[in-house]
Structure formats: C-alpha cells, structure tokens
Image: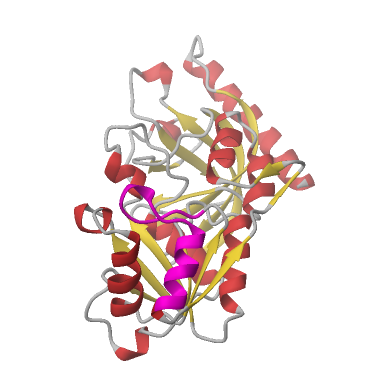
Amino acid sequence: MQIHRDWTGLPAGARGASVAMGNFDGVHLGHRAVIEAARQAGAPLGIVTFEPHPRQFFAPDAPPFRLMNSESRANRLARLGVEQLYELPFGAVLAGLSPEAFARDVLVGGLGVTHVTVGADFVFGKDRAGNVATLQDLGRQLGFGVTVVPLVGAGGQDYSSTAIRCALTDGRPRDAERMLGHLHRIEGEVVHGNKRGREFGWPTANMQMDDLHLPRLGVYAVVVEVLTGPDKLSCQGVASLGVRPMFGRNAPNLEVHLFDFDGDLYGQHLSVGLVEFLRDEAKFDSVQTLIDQIAADASQARAVLAGA
C-alpha cells in the first residue's frame, strides 16, 4: 500500500483510483461496507481520509477520542487490500474549502479519482455544507462516479465510532468487537517503565495511551501480536490499563504481561487486542496483596482466552 500525505504532485500511478472517503476511525463494519463498495468500481482501491481527524483540528483541547492512531489505521487498511491511502493534511486550508472547491481541486485536480464511495451520513466542505446529494451533483459535473452506502447496524443501532467508544468506556470489548468486526486493538511502541512488574515476578510491556480514547480502566484478557523485531509472534496475555493508584498519580498507560514469553520488547511495536474486561483498577493494602491479585488475574485471563 502506498501512502500519500498531500493531494498535489502525485505520480501518475497514484491517480485514477476508486476511493472510499471518510475518517475511518476504528475501521468498523460500516467502514468495511463503504470500502467493499469502492472495490467494485473496477479501478485501483484507494482511501481518502484526513490527519489529524477534523474533530482534533476544530476542538484541540477536547479529551482524546480516537480509537486508533494513523499508523494503526494504515495497518488495518493495508490488511483490507487498499492500494492507495491518501492521508490528507487537515488544517485551515482544507477546512476552508467549499464542497465545490474540495471536489474540483482535491478529488479531481489532485487525486484524479474515477469513483467516490461514502456512507449515507457523509458531510464535507466548509461548515459541513456538503452532503451525499451535493457529492452526487458534483460527480455528474466533474466526471466521477458516486456510490452512497446505507448505514450498517444491528438491533436498531447503527455501527459507529461513537457507539464503539461507548462500549469500550463501559468495559464491553465484546460489544465493540461485534461492531468493529475485529478486536479493538491498541498499537504502539513498548517504552521503558518503572520495572516494578519484573520485580514482582510479572514483567510487563508498557505502552502509552497518548491521544487515544481510554477504555474502562482495569484489567483485561488480551491477545498480543509483536509486529516488529526478532520476536514477531502472536500470544495471549493479561493487561492492566490505568494510572497505577498504588504508586502515586500517573498518566494512563497499558501494561501487558505476555504469557509464556521471555524476551526484550523495548522499542518494538505491539498490537494488543482487548478480549474481555476482568475487573476495575484498584488500590491494594500491600504489595503482596497486589502480587496475589495479579496471579489471580492471569489465571482468570487464561481461562477466558482458552474458551474464547
């Protein structure tokens, strides 16, 4: 998959795609439906998305809300067979374009798209002035096809990034998985921590949660993929997502203990899939009580994952 971070100066081979357009936060089943419809147009499959997420641009001080960072999104899209990823820089220039200017200058003049596929609730352009009807009109004028995909859902609820965030906030990763079509995964680099887990006999890989939506704080049964380094593998584990209340005030992070693994993961990238929420984060009376609870958590996680 080729990644382009501008709409100007593209090589000829990067133009002429059939694109699915949207934010694709989470790449959930609704997004998958849009991508699959774009695949049917008989041209190389592309994605038009935005970085940062427009919501981050318009509300930079709002709490983190993203389900995945741009790297995780790209990894997921590559697995779906996307050939061209147009990760357009969202700032004052894009935000200020009218729907007509966006279609003319970006989609046609810049990317040379042949077909555009969007979800039924898609809006675009300055002040969100354009909708799917606007896009269809502009496609007829400018010479590209447009497909509008109905929203996807079940039980009277549309699948959406908002609904997935709610499920994760409530500690319902299996409900999130049903809407995503895959486990909710936290991906990132393993960083150095305070190494208390190793001192306790439960070494952990530590990952930061910067700019990501926080699921319910607590302990999870997880599956882990080591994406880089000499120890590329898939394994199971138990993870604590939280602020470590026994040891002062800390920024939220993810601490993952990989079952039956003994290696150095510092600097490597992990993908941690949340399978089941086990318990809330807690402050214990003593270190030994904490160690005993970690052992119980690991045992429970093994049992959950054996039956998953």
| Outermost bottom residue | 12
- Residue 4 seen in the figure: no
Number of numbered discs = 0
Residue 152, position as x, y percentages in the image? 67, 54
Where on the picture, by quarter, is residue 163? Answer: top right
- Residue 288 seen in the figure: yes
Residue at point 30% right, 37% down? 59
Where on the picture, by quarter, is residue 143? Answer: bottom left
| Outermost top residue | 285
Residue 298, position as x, y percentages in the image? 63, 35
Residue at point 60% right, 23% down? 293
Q: Nearer the viewer, residue 258 or 87?
A: 87
Residue 284 higher or lower than 115, as above or below: above
Residue at point 51% right, 86% down? 43
Q: Nearer the viewer, residue 104 or 151?
A: 104
Where on the picture, by quarter, is residue 110? Answer: bottom left
Residue 157 lies in magenta, yes or no? no
Q: Nearer the viewer, residue 154 or 139?
A: 139
Residue 196, position as x, y percentages in the image? 40, 31
Residue 91, position as x, y percentages in the image? 23, 53
Residue 133 lies in magenta, yes or no? yes
Residue 182 higher or lower than 191, as above or below: below
Q: Residue 305 vs residue 57: left or right? A: right
Quadrant showing the N terminus: bottom left
Q: Which residues are magenta?
A: 122-141
Residue 15 higher or lower than 137, as above or below: below
Majority secondary structure of the magenta segment?
helix
Q: Nearer the viewer, residue 202 or 91?
A: 91
Q: Residue 103 vs residue 47: left or right? A: left
Q: How is the image coloured?
A: secondary structure
Residue at point 34% right, 56% down? 125
